[in-house]
């Protein structure tokens, strides 16, 4: 076992346990999804496993010698640190030894060459070599290059990086630490689709143990082979990925419901018998009271199944406005740029009634800018954006704000939706805001609750063109399902930006893919679009292009041959220098008591490391072409 947790209890408030007797085991190499609603204790569990949070009772055992690392949903690093500092933090133990070596070297240089100092130097030098101190710079550069962490990005303050960049840097740090157990807390947050697929590929091929907290159902299906759900502080086990979990959870619910109904029927049968005996006893046979009391005691002792419950399904419906024409949106020669970056170039697009379009693309390509142009919050450089005369737009932004965050939910509905108090309470109740909750301030709501409130406000308006910008971002699975339930019955035009592949596959009938100023309009589902991309790769690979001249072929062939020869030459030189670096490391270990010899060896190694860095960069360029 890599991880063993038994009867774990953790509370933040007296009498309210977040984890209440949680027990589970994880075998080496398992890839497990940790599921549960927000607030059930998933992140608390990860912090306990990492040792950064104490628990009240129970036991937590991590296999001896196994190193554990965590990518946090909200990474915390010292404010002045750059991305380079975060990467180098993986070698903090080695840097500590390096400082000790320097201090001992300074003492020996000043004339203190006692046996005790020499022994200390030998011991620290041996540990420094054994831990890979002389190879750490090469390892750092190789890993950073492999993950696409450029030198420019490495020099930036970590706090200024995007969410996706922070995830990449943190993952590189864990790789450099040579972690055996990965704890990933919402690793796909802030990542675009390309980065998420890269992460999935890495996790799939990671040979160690992985525990993932994620609301990305596609990710959970792809990387997890077992699921653990935390419910009421305890663990429920499912021996499959997320899709298996959904089916099995429903199967277990139905089984519990059948058992509960069977138990209740048995109780009713016994109670009827007891009531009948009491009635006959009152009619003159007092001895029957004793038998009736015996049956009632039997009822009290029966082990009955607790009635299973699940979250109430969303039953709200949009107040849709009828179209008087099919045309919803029309763009003509639409162009938009920021400096040298082109967002759109001569985009001619149409949206018709009942179209369901997913707008996809990497972070920063301009999806939100395009949405703002449709909403007339951003002006195009040239071209036009026209909405149909009967179009009424409903918009759910990525960052949800309200006019006054100190108002209660009820007052927000009254002020912004112009409805009666009873109408406001009825609509809020449909979205799960009931009882005293309606008097809570908007400021106190979680991200998922804010989305639900905004959707509640939108659904009360007559709309026929719904625009959603990252509607499932930061929401747990239950909240995503709430939004999906609300959209299920919506029948008019829908345009949404999303990286949630599960959501896209469920709703999109067209795909708009933005990339480097162009926009591809694909008629079909998301899976069909992915199949189309795979076919295009094959076509590009085997396209013969017969119109090319023979000289073009010869020139291209010569370039390929020259690049292949240069790549082979570079690889040989890298291998030769790495072998020489190992020889120097062995030589340093053999002469660890000879200070002058060590300095000479270290100078040679530093020169080799610089040459290797240049060769690695050259190899990357040759490999990419």
Image (cartoon, rainbow, N blue to C red):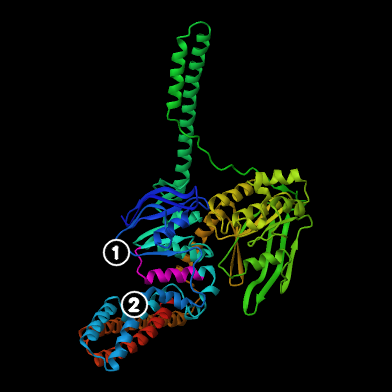
The 10 Å Cα crowd at callout 1, few under 14, some 14 to 19, many 20 or more, is: few
Q: Label 2, on which residue?
A: 94
Q: Report the quarter where the N terminus lies.
A: bottom left
Callout 2 secondary element: helix
**Residue nearest the viewer, comparing 541 with 421:** 421
Question: Please, is residue 388 above or below residue 250 in the view?
Answer: below
Q: Is residue 428 above or below residue 190?
A: above
Q: Main secondary structure of the magenta part?
A: helix
Does 537 lie within the magenta span? no
- Which residues fall within the magenta stretch? 165-180
Q: Residues within 10 Å of mark 2 (few under 14, many from 20)?
A: many
Q: Name, please, the residue furthest toward the top.
A: 284
SS label for mark 1: loop
Q: Residue at x 55, y 74 (%)?
A: 160
441 up-or-down from 132: above or below:
above
Corner quadrant of residue 360: bottom right
Distance (Cα) linking label 2 and label 1: 18 Å
Give the percent coordinates (x, y) of residue 32. 40, 54
Q: Can residue 316 be seen at all in this image of the molecule?
A: no
Tally of numbered discs:
2
Taking the spot 50% from the left edge, 65% from the top edge, the residue there is 194
Circle nearer the N terminus (2, 1): 1
Q: In which quadrant of the rendered image does the C terminus lie?
A: bottom left
Location of residue 210 in the rendering, given as x and y in whole percent from the top left corner: 39, 59
Q: Which residue is mark 1?
A: 65
Is residue 173 part of the magenta span, yes or no? yes
Identify the residue at image location x=40%, y=62%. Answer: 50
């Amino acid at each position: 076992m890599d991880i063993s947790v038994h009867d774990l209890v953790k509370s933040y408030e007296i009498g309210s346990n977040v984890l209440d007797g949680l027990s589970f085991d994880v075998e080496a190499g398992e890839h497990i999804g940790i599921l549960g609603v927000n607030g059930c204790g998933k992140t608390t569990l990860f912090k306990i496993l990492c040792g950064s949070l104490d628990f009240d009772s129970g036991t937590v055992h991590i296999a001896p010698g196994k190193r554990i690392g965590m990518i946090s949903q909200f990474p915390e690093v010292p404010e002045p640190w750059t991305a380079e500092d975060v990467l180098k933090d993986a070698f903090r133990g080695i840097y500590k030894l390096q400082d000790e070596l320097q201090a001992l070297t300074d003492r020996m240089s000043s004339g203190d060459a006692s046996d005790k100092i020499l022994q200390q130097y030998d011991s620290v030098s041996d540990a420094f070599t054994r831990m890979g101190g002389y190879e750490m710079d090469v390892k750092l550069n190789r890993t950073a290059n492999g993950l696409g962490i450029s030198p420019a990005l490495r020099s930036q303050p970590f706090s200024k990086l995007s969410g996706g960049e922070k995830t990449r840097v943190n993952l590189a740090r864990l790789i450099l630490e040579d972690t055996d157990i990965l704890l990933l807390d919402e690793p796909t947050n802030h990542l675009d689709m390309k980065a998420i697929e890269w992460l999935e590929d890495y996790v799939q091929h990671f040979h160690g143990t992985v525990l993932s907290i994620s609301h990305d159902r596609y990710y959970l299906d792809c990387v997890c082979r077992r699921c653990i759900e935390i419910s009421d502080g305890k663990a429920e086990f499912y021996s499959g990925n997320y899709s298996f979990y959904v089916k099995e959870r429903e199967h277990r619910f139905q089984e519990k419901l059948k058992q509960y109904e069977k138990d209740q029927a048995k109780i009713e049968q016994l109670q009827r018998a007891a009531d009948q005996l009491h009635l006959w006893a009152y009619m003159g046979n007092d001895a029957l009271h004793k038998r009736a009391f015996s049956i009632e005691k039997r009822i009290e002792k029966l082990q009955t199944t607790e009635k299973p419950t699940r979250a109430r399904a969303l039953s709200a419906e949009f107040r849709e406005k009828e179209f008087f024409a099919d045309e919803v949106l029309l763009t003509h020669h639409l162009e938009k740029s920021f400096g040298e970056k082109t967002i759109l170039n001569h985009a001619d697009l149409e949206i018709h009634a009942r179209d369901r379009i997913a707008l996809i693309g990497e972070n920063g390509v301009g999806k939100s800018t395009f949405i703002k142009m449709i909403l007339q919050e951003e002006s195009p450089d040239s071209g036009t954006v026209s909405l149909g005369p009967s179009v009424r737009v409903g918009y759910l932004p990525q960052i949800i704000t309200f006019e006054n965050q100190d108002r209660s939910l009820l007052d927000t509905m009254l002020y912004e939706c112009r409805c009666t108090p009873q109408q406001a309470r009825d609509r809020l109740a449909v979205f799960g805001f009931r009882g005293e909750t309606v008097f809570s301030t908007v400021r106190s709501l979680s991200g998922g609750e804010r989305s639900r409130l905004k959707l509640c406000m939108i659904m009360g308006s007559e709309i026929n063109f719904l625009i959603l910008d990252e509607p499932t971002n930061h929401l747990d699975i239950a909240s995503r399902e709430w939004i999906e339930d609300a959209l299920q019955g919506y029948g008019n035009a829908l345009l949404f930006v999303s990286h949630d592949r599960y959501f896209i596959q469920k709703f999109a009938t067209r795909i708009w893919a933005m990339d480097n100023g162009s926009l591809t309009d694909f008629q079909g589902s998301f899976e069909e679009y992915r199949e189309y991309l795979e076919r295009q790769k094959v076509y590009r690979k085997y396209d013969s292009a017969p119109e090319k001249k023979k000289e073009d072929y010869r020139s291209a062939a010569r370039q390929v041959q020259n690049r292949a020869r240069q790549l082979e030459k570079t690889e040989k030189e890298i291998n030769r220098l790495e072998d020489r670096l190992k020889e120097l490391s062995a030589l340093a270990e053999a002469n660890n008591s000879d200070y002058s010899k060590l300095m000479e060896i270290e100078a040679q190694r530093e020169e080799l490391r610089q040459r290797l860095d240049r060769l690695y960069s050259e190899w990357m360029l040759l490999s990419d072409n």
